[in-house]
Amino acid sequence: MRAWLFIFTVCVAALLAACQTVPVTADYAKTYGEAYAQGFEAGFNKAKTLNTGTGGVYGNLYNDPYYNDYGAVDKESLAYAVQKNDLKKVKELVDAGRAVDELDPSGYTPLQLAARSGFQPMVEYLLSKGAEVNFQSSDGYTPLKEAVTYRKAAMAELLIAKGADINFVDTSGASILYYAAQAGDQTLVKLLLSKKVALEQKTISGGWTPFLIAASYGFHPIVTLLADAGADVNARETTSGKTALFYLIPSGNLTTIKLLLDKGAKIDMPDNAGDTPLLLAKRLGQQAVIDLLEQKNVKPM
């Protein structure tokens, strides 16, 4: 019985992990970023436990792993010194002729590594030595994308001041604003909006806009910021055809829903399955939401 329960639990966990568009919690992105930002040592020690040298998860492939599981790295590399936040060592290496944009085993530059960790003096030094502020790794990420993903608002502001492209789009079609919205970081979203960032960039898969991704995660303050900035409140996720209202109605947050209605959100726009926001509200028994929607003269269905 216990074995079957264990198998069932694992399957459910795998299923949930696969459903990337299902909202987690409003604190998910923040917690994720903070966990990553705990720094070098935690990841280094974790990687060492994986590298058993006897087959294990990685076998003998990674004799000197550093943060997480990125593989062997020279302790005299810039990547190693940057992850240790050892500015003195970084200066020594650069003065000795090491390329300031030397790539680590995963294809990231020292500037990207420092940006994601929020090491401001390190970033300022690397930039002063000519580090490429808009360098794109093979996955299309830039230092600014790293800073935004890991909720480093002060770092993002510094990089933007140094010429980072706020309208950068990665290989998935996602913009910097998309990642800020997905992270649920109001400070970052406000910063980007103050710089007149493009609002409507869509991902290649699903056509997700920053506004839609914020709604899908239930980040109501971000939804409000983007709606007030002029985001298209009727943008549709192409796979399901759902608009932001579909994602917000289950929460019953009347303030945000009313804001979208006042901004012109269409409550009779069906998704690809023929469902509408009103039908969804009725199915969920959200009477206060139903009353609000029906005030917009939509006939009950």
Image: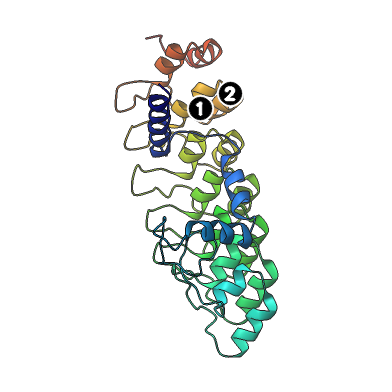
- The residue that appears at 52% across and 39% down in the rendered structure is 214
Residue 120 seen from this side: yes
Vertical position of residue 299 compared to residue 183: above or below: above
Most foreground residue, 187 or 17? 17
Name which of mark 2 and mark 1 comes first in the sequence: 1
Graded by Cα atoms within 10 Å as few (under 14), some (14 to 19) or many (20 or more), the crowding at tag 1 reads: many
Q: Position of residue 17 (x, y in %)?
A: 42, 38
Most foreground residue, 56 or 204? 56
Number of callouts in the render? 2
Asked which colour scheme the image uses, the reply is rainbow
Q: Position of residue 25 (x, y in %)?
A: 56, 34
The label on residue 248 is: 1
State yes or no: discs 2 and 1 in contact (Cβ < 8 Å).
yes
Which amino acid does the dot numbered 2 rest on? Answer: Asn
Quadrant of residue 153 within the rendered picture: bottom right
Left or right position of 273 against 285: left
Kindly identify which residue carries mark 2.
Answer: 253
Indicate the quadrant containing the N terminus: top left, top right, bottom left or bottom right.
Answer: top left
Q: CA distance from mark 2 to mark 1?
A: 7 Å
- The residue that appears at 55% across and 62% down in the rendered structure is 67
Identify the secondary structure beneath mark 2.
loop
